[in-house]
Amino acid sequence: MSRILTGIQSSGKPHLGNLLGAIIPAIKLSQDSNNESFFFIADLHSLTTIKDADVRKDNVNAVAAAWLAFGFDTDKNLFYRQSMVPQVTELNWYMSCFTPFPMLANAHSFKDKSDRLADVNAGLFTYPVLMACDIILYDADIVPVGKDQKQHLEMTRDIASGFNHRYGDVFVLPEARIDEQIMTIPGTDGQKMSKSYGNTIDIFQTDKKLRKNVMQIITDSTPMEEPKNPDDCNVYNIYKLLASDEQVAEMRKNYEGGNYGYGHAKQALYELIVEKYSKERELYNHYMENIDELHKKLEKGEEKAAEIATKTLKRVRKVLGF
Ligand code: ADP
Ligand code: TRP
C-alpha cells in the first residue's frame, strides 16, 4: 500500500485546465486500491499571497466542492484543509532550523521574484519548508506534482534526509511522481489555460455565463462559407479534449466542409460541456449551497490527519529533546 499525498492550491475556482490536467487524473490515481491518498487544500500557503479572509474561505470551499463533485471518495481517502491540522506549523519551525539559507535562496519560486524583493514576504521565502513539512508529517511515499514542483520535492528529500542522517530514521523520504504525459489544456486565447492569463473556462458557472465564456474563445475571421482548418482553431482544440471520437470526427468534417461558422462550433462545445458535466455541475452547486455538509467531509479527514501528525511530531520532539 503506497501513501500518495498532494497539496492543492486554493487560489480560486478550478477551471477546465485544472480539472483535466490535475483533478481528474489525481482522482483516478486515488481509485487504485493499492493506494491510500492524502489530498489537502494548501490554504496556509495561500496566505503568502491572499490576505482577504472572505476570498480565502470562498476559494477553499470552491476547490473542495470541485474535488467532491468530480468524485473524490472521502471514505477511502483523506481530504483536509492544511490549516485545520496546525501540527504542520510546529514541524515547520523545527525543520526551518535545519534548512540552509542558500537552499531557499536557490528555489525557483523565490528566484523568480528576487528582482522585486520588497514584495517578497518571509512566508514566500520559506514556502518550500512548509511544503516539505506537509509531506514528511504524514510519512508520504509518493507525491504527484507538476514539473514546476520538482525542485520543491528535491528540497523536501534533502531536508528530511539531513535530519535523518543526524537523528536516525525519523522521516520517510518521499518520491516525486511527475507525469510528463499530462497535456497542457489551451485557454480561450490558445495559450496555456491559466488564471494568470485570464483565459480560463469555468464550467461551474451558470449556463448563461458559461455560454458567454465559451463564446469568448478567440477565432480568426474566415467567413462562414469557407472551409476551415480545425487544427488551427482554439474551439476545436478544446472540443476534442472532451468529445467522443465520433463527435470529433463530425466536427472536423464540418470545419473542412465549409458553411460551418465558429459560432456553430462554440455552441456545440457549450452544449457538450453542459451535457458531459451535468452531474458534476449540479453536485458542485449542491456543496456550495450546503457548506456544512462540505465541511463535515473535510472534518472527517482532518481528524484522521491530526492523529497521524501528532504521532510524527512526538517522534520529532523526542529526538530534539523537547
Ligand atoms: P493556474 O495556472 O490557473 O494558476 P495552478 O497553477 O493553480 O493553475 O494549477 C493547479 C493545477 O492544475 C496544477 O497541477 C497544474 O499543473 C494544473 N493545470 C493548471 N493549468 C493547466 C492547464 N492549462 N493544462 C493542464 N494542467 C493545468
Ligand atoms: N506548492 C504546491 C503547488 O503550488 C502545493 C503544495 C503545497 C503541495 N504543499 C504541498 C504539493 C505538498 C504537494 C505536496 O502546486
Image (cartoon, rainbow, N blue to C red):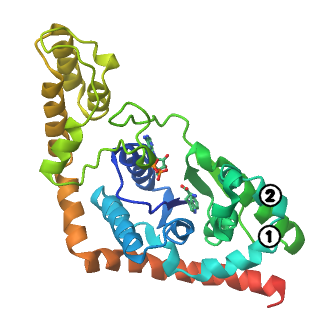
Q: Is residue 125 visible?
A: yes
Could you tell me residue 143's position as x and y percent? 59, 55
Name the image quarter holding residue 259. top left
Q: Earlier in the sequence, mark 2 or mark 1?
A: 2
Where's residue 91, x and y in %?
A: 69, 78
| The N terminus, quarter of image | bottom right
Disc 1 residue lies near ligand 2 with CB under 8 A = no
The quadrant in which residue 231 appears is top left
Q: Which residue is mark 1?
A: 169
Kind of residue indicated by mark 2: Met
Q: Nearer the viewer, residue 37 or 230?
A: 230
Residue 20, compared with residue 121, is above or below; it is above
User: Is residue 1 something one can see in this rendering?
Assistant: no
**Residue 275 locus on image (x, y percent):** 14, 43
Residue 8 percent across, percent down from the top left? 48, 60
Q: Amino acid at mark 1?
A: Asp
SS at badge 1: loop
Q: Nearer the viewer, residue 134 or 126?
A: 126
Q: Which residue is mark 2?
A: 103
